[in-house]
């Protein structure tokens, strides 16, 4: 009774064909079709699966009583992850069927197991219809994609959700490594970092006209949409929109720690932020203002003194506007020992008096210089020139006079 079974096993060795899906080490399912004389096997079988590094046998796994239905079978393979260090391997299959009967026979040639990557090695004709999950615990990348085509618009990795009409409105104009697009959801990519981590780090240091991040809003009719949205949650955490060189448009309150510095360009609308401003009471106390200055009334010299944090005030280096809150008064400002001095004088007898006032201080930092040169001396207008003659303003810019041709301006250590 055993001879027919043994003959069947021998016949199996000479006429078997094996069609397999792409393997996924180190723990993966290997699916295949087993045939004898062109017909699918309908019984169970025993398998030995060997892992080869060239001609060297690395390890093997045995799977017994594997059910086969219409020739189709599945093998759960769990090789030791330590073997998968980037080496290309081959799989060799030995089988006996029915299970427990006869000797093992080798099935055809060995199957290559590639490192590009172990998780999935596919060409452009392959499509994976089932959901895939990749778990890795090695020093090597979990997934590595090598796209050698550098033609315009080529993407190494593309992920979409929903019925996306086209890869991007920028398709064919910009090269990119990865591209994600969502047709019916508000977020294409979301990243979360819990502890001292970075959700994303992008660096652009080769192309002077490139960008590390490109964000595009394509939908119309939504006032609250944003190409880049940084949110800190909970309060007190930092959601950086930009670091290093800053560029952005902000709506609502903006909290800034440090200086706001801008370049002044001829012919443009230039605005500067004051470094300090406030309302000083008659007795020299502060009624309101920025929290970075102190004030006092000096009764000995009949003047107000203001000390701005981290600033050594010298009248020639700052611009201050003072508005007295009293009638029949004029204002004079000066500096001494790094303090802003404010004198309120009566227009009746020119004596220094006590009176509340408001002030705003700016720090130009050389804004009067344009490309290293000071502006030329302004010439008086001809009395026959009308406003119409001056339109449109500004007129043709006058040539700049080099700085070194002007008298040197020195900053005395003290002035009263």
Image: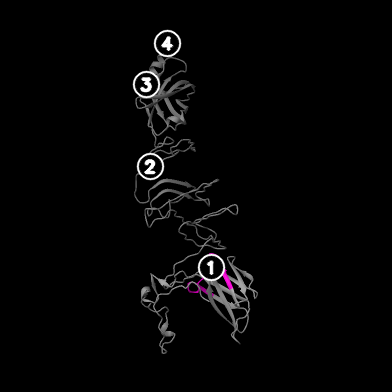
Tell me the residue that label 4 is attached to.
3
Q: Residue 399 in the image: state x and y as whole percent.
A: 36, 77
Q: Residue 229 in the image: state x and y as whole percent.
A: 52, 55
Classed neighbour count for the residue bearing mark 3: other residues with Cα under 10 Å, few (<14), some (14–19), many (≥20): some
Q: Residue 259 in the image: state x and y as whole percent.
A: 51, 63
Tell me the residue that label 2 is attached to.
146
Proximity of marks 3 and 1: CB atoms separated by less than 8 Å? no
Judging from the image, the colouring scheme is: one colour
Q: How far is the residue under mark 4 from the one under mark 2?
A: 53 Å
Of 106 and 379, nearer the camera is 379
In which quadrant will I find the N terminus? top left
Numbered badge on residue 15: 3
Is-magenta flag for residue 306? yes
Mark sitting earlier along the chain (2/3): 3
| Magenta part of the chain | 305-320
Is-magenta flag for residue 401? no
Q: In the displayed structure, does residue 126 sit left or right of residue 224? A: left
Closer to viewer: mark 4 or mark 1: 1
Of 385 and 353, nearer the camera is 353
Classed neighbour count for the residue bearing mark 2: other residues with Cα under 10 Å, few (<14), some (14–19), many (≥20): few
Label 3 sits on a secondary structure element that is loop
Classed neighbour count for the residue bearing mark 4: other residues with Cα under 10 Å, few (<14), some (14–19), many (≥20): few
Tell me the residue that label 1 is attached to.
275
Q: How far is the residue under mark 3 from the one under mark 1?
A: 89 Å
Compared with 47, 307 (above or below) is below
Q: How far is the residue under mark 1 from the one under mark 2?
A: 52 Å
Label 4 sits on a secondary structure element that is helix
Proximity of marks 4 and 2: CB atoms separated by less than 8 Å? no
């Amino acid at each position: 009774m055993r001879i027919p079974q043994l003959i069947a096993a021998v016949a199996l060795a000479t006429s078997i064909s094996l069609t397999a899906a792409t393997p996924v080490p180190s723990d993966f399912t290997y699916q295949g079709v087993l045939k004898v004389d062109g017909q699918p096997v309908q019984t169970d079988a025993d398998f030995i699966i060997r892992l080869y590094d060239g001609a060297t046998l690395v390890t093997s796994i045995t799977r017994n009583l594997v059910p086969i239905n219409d020739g189709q079978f599945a093998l759960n393979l769990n090789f030791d992850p330590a073997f998968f260090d980037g080496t290309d391997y081959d799989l060799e299959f030995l089988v006996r069927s029915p299970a427990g009967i006869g000797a093992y026979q080798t099935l055809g040639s060995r199957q290559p197991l590639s490192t590009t990557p172990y998780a999935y090695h596919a060409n452009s004709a392959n499509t994976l219809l089932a959901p895939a999950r990749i778990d890795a615990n090695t020093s090597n990348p979990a997934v590595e994609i090598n796209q050698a085509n550098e033609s315009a618009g080529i993407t190494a990795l593309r992920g979409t959700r929903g019925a996306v009409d086209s890869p991007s409105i920028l398709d064919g104009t910009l090269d990119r490594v990865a591209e994600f697009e969502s047709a019916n959801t508000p977020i294409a990519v979301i990243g979360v970092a819990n502890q001292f981590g970075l959700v994303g780090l992008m660096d652009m240091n080769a192309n002077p006209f490139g960008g590390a991040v490109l964000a595009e809003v394509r939908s119309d009719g939504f006032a609250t949409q944003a190409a880049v949205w940084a949110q800190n949650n909970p309060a007190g955490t930092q959601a950086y929109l930009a670091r290093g060189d800053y560029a952005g448009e902000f709506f609502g309150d903006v909290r800034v720690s440090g200086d706001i510095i801008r370049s002044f360009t001829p012919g443009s609308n230039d605005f500067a932020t004051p470094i300090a401003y406030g309302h000083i009471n008659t007795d020299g106390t502060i009624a309101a203002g920025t929290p970075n200055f102190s004030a006092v009334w000096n009764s000995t010299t009949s003047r107000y003194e203001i000390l701005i944090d981290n600033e050594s005030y010298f009248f020639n280096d700052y611009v201050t506007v003072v508005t007295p809150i009293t009638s029949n008064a004029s204002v004079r400002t000066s500096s001494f020992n790094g303090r802003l001095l404010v004198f309120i004088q009566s227009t009746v007898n020119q004596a220094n008096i006590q009176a509340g006032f408001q002030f705003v201080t700016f720090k130009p930092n050389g804004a009067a210089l344009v490309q290293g040169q000071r502006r030329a001396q302004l010439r008086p207008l001809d009395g026959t020139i009308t406003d119409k003659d001056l339109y449109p303003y500004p007129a043709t810019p006058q040539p700049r006079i080099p700085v070194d041709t002007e008298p040197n301006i020195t900053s005395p250590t003290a002035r009263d």
